[in-house]
Image (cartoon, rainbow, N blue to C red):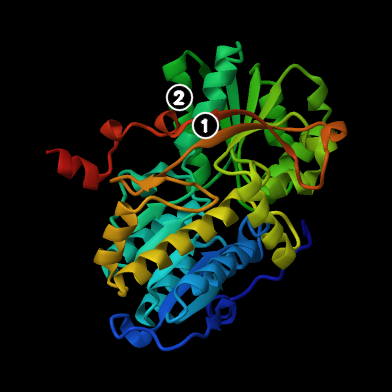
Amino acid sequence: MDHRKRRPRTLWTSVAGALTAVALMATPSSAEISDGVIKIGILNDQSGTFSDLSGKGSVAAAKLALEDFKKIAPAVKVELLVADHQNKADIGAQIVRRWFADGVDMVADVTNSAVALAVQSLGREKNKIITYAAVGTVDITGKQCAATGLAWLHDNYNLVAGPIRKLVGQGQDKWFFIAADYAFGRNMVAESERMLTSVGGKSLGSVFHPIGNADYSSFLLQAQSSGSKVVAFANAGEQLVSSIKQWHEFNMGSGTQTPVALLMFLTDIHGMGLETAKGLTGVTAWYWDLNDDTRAFAKRFYALHGAMPTAPQASVYSAVFHYLKAVAALDSDDTDRVLEKMRATPVDDFYAPGAKLRADGKLVHDFYLVQVKEPKELDKPWAYYKVLEKISADVAYRPLSESDCPLVTAKAK
């Protein structure tokens, strides 16, 4: 993971310079497809704290989806565009607004919760599909849901429910939170505190750090003095890597508190190393070493990207491929018809076989409670997780009956 300082860019440079496009040529497509081409935009963090877990790897995953799609629909022309939102909601919204004006049909990934909330309204307004990967805030499929906004990976409820239920059941009932100070982190702490209350646990407090923070000493000392049994980290990417490294520098690993990474990605573990990460517990929607199908995709992905895929990157493949298959089946890119087809058709791939979209826009699939291996347990490169248990789809999600998504509540009336 690259920790070098990056030069700030102006808004103009950010939007104009970050946009790239790759055209995958095929024979002329049907006249039912507007402009004769399907345009898909991959919007994420290409250069900052979340770039390893999504970034160029998500682009590689989308390219593999397009490669597989060409095998089943060679007559459809697809163009892939890529942009870096730099974890800034205004930049992300400006890029997506421009893309939609230029005929982009579907946007995937997004990565950042604040950016997701900014672009969700654009998808609703322009009637364009946006699929979200590493976006944690429950508001995307809750009170700010849209028919065009689809959560393909997880939300904060999925991520916190499993660890909290398991650890509180083991007597680890007092928690303190170190969280990123933006929509994702604050929502994750709120979801965690709600879940703790429901299972008999207790929050002893929380502290929030800026997204670009490098020194976590004051936050860790507050956690240490809180009297909690668990210190939960509601951050990700470079933030989590730095937090856990400094946890060990303060020798907190030898104490009685248990560290929990509420949002943990394979690249985070790779960045901090097994000696530092060993024993961390978290939830993931997908892991490359689950079965033969996941390993086959990982082998292709590694050949293209030079690293094993994270769950967000695998979900980008799945979302793009599922969308394109719906377009091909209909011979049309009409948003309403494509959405209806996507919702009616179960996912058929290595990521979430048999998964279906719910009324609130969540793709409902299984999750896995995992723990990072000890260095001596590593039997092959990148195989960092022990799967402790599968969290079945029927318990991984907040019940639809409790949803505050207007699409659901309006239908219930």
Q: Determine which residue is flagged by label 1.
A: 160
Q: Secondary structure at mark 1?
A: helix
Left or right: 81 in relation to 232: left
Determine whether 97 is above or below 207 in the image.
below
Describe residue 122's horizontal placement relative to residue 9 as left or right: left
The residue that mark 2 highlights is: 195
The answer to which of marks 2 and 1 sits earlier in the sequence is 1
Residue 89 visible at all: no
> Residue at horizontal 53%, vertical 71%?
66
In the image, farthest residue toward the bottom: 28
Amino acid type, residue under disc 2 in the picture: Met
| Callouts 2 and 1 close, C-beta under 8 Å | yes
Look at the picture and state if 273 lies above or below 99.
above
| Quadrant of the image occupied by residue 18 | bottom right
Q: Quadrant of the C terminus?
A: top left
Crowdedness near tag 2: few (<14), some (14–19) or many (≥20) residues, C-alpha within 10 Å? some
Compute the Cα span from label 2 to label 1.
8 Å
- Quadrant where the N terminus sits is bottom right
Q: Residue at x 50, y 60 (%)?
A: 110
Whether residue 396 appears in this view of the structure is yes
Give the numbered dot on residue 292.
none
The location of residue 410, given as percent across then percent down, is: 16, 44
Within-10-Å neighbours for mark 1: few <14, some 14–19, many 20+: many
- Along the horizontal axis of the image, is 241 left or right of 337? right
Question: Where residue 5 appears, x then y in whole percent?
Answer: 76, 63
At a point 55% along the width and 78% down the height, the residue shown is 19
Q: Residue at the location (51% across, 66% down)? A: 43
Name the amino acid, label 1: Val
Left or right of 307? Residue 232 is left
